[in-house]
Amino acid sequence: MSGVTNVEPTSRDRVLSAAQQLIIDHGFVDFSMRELAEVSGLAKATIYHHFPDKQTICHSVVEIEFADLRDRIITAAQSAESPVERLRAVVDELLGPQLERRLVVLLAAHEAVGLGMHFHSIIKRYRNEMVAPIVDIIQDGIDRGDFRTVNVEMTVISLMGMMQSYITHRILISPDQQLDNIVEHTLDLLLN
């Protein structure tokens, strides 16, 4: 047996995990603290011990999702030498196996008005941290002559928009439909 031990999730972790699932199933607004207690298997008093209200729970879930997405983008952006391969790795990561978790980010953007100003500060902070590695890849590609000269910031916004559209389509409209070669298609649209 290896030296790895199973670590039991804390009650706070259980609340956040249950909240994430409820957000995916019902959205931020449409789940109750009673449902959260049932799904997490914890008493409402335990939930309130960790979080003063539902909005704070939602902020915490969004923060976790944005941090995870940022870390995945940074790792993918450093995964190869060539700008084309690094960009491919970023697009593949964003459209890959963690796709369903992106629904939390989509729902958060959709319901942003009800989540308050703290939510907007989370989005602004993580947006810059997620976009910077992609900006660097595109600028490096331009500098090396691999990419044509473009407005880098607008190109990143366009790329993120294409991916968000695919994610929305895949998760909300046609969850069973597999669009073959979506990563290569997205890169082709971007690069050519």
Image (cartoon, rainbow, N blue to C red):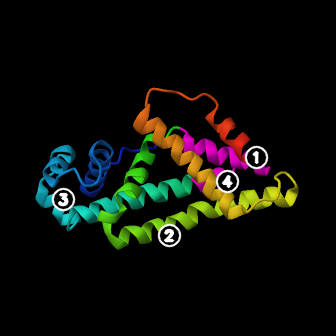
The boundaries of the magenta stretch are 73-96
Q: What kind of residue is marked 2? A: Arg
Badge 2: how crowded within 10 Å, few (<14), some, or many (20+)? few
Q: Amino acid at mark 3?
A: Ile
Q: Secondary structure at mark 1?
A: helix
In contact (CB < 8 Å): disc 4 and disc 3: no
Mark identifier at residue 191: 1
In primary-sequence order, the first of circles 1 and 2 is 2
Please tell me which residue lies in front, 134 or 36.
134
Q: Nearer the viewer, residue 140 or 116?
A: 116
Visible residue check, residue 134: no
Is 41 covered by the magenta stretch? Answer: no
Q: Earlier in the sequence, mark 1 or mark 4?
A: 4
Q: Position of residue 148 (x, y in %)?
A: 83, 54
The quarter of the picture where the N terminus appears is top left
Q: Are marks 1 and 2 in contact (CB under 8 Å)?
A: no
Q: Residues within 10 Å of mark 1 (few under 14, many from 20)?
A: few
**108 displayed left or right of 143:** left
Q: Position of residue 174 (x, y in %)?
A: 44, 31
Could you tell me which secondary element the residue under label 3 belongs to?
helix
Question: What residue did someone put label 2 on?
Answer: 125
Q: Is residue 171 left or right of residue 186?
A: left
Camera-side residue of 3 and 126: 126
Across and down, in percent, residue 75 comes to 62, 53
Direction from residue 111 to residue 90 in the image, left or right: right
Check whether the beta carbons of the residues at disc 4 and disc 2 lie within 8 A of each other. Answer: no
Q: CA distance from mark 1 to mark 3?
A: 48 Å
Q: Which residue is mark 4?
A: 77
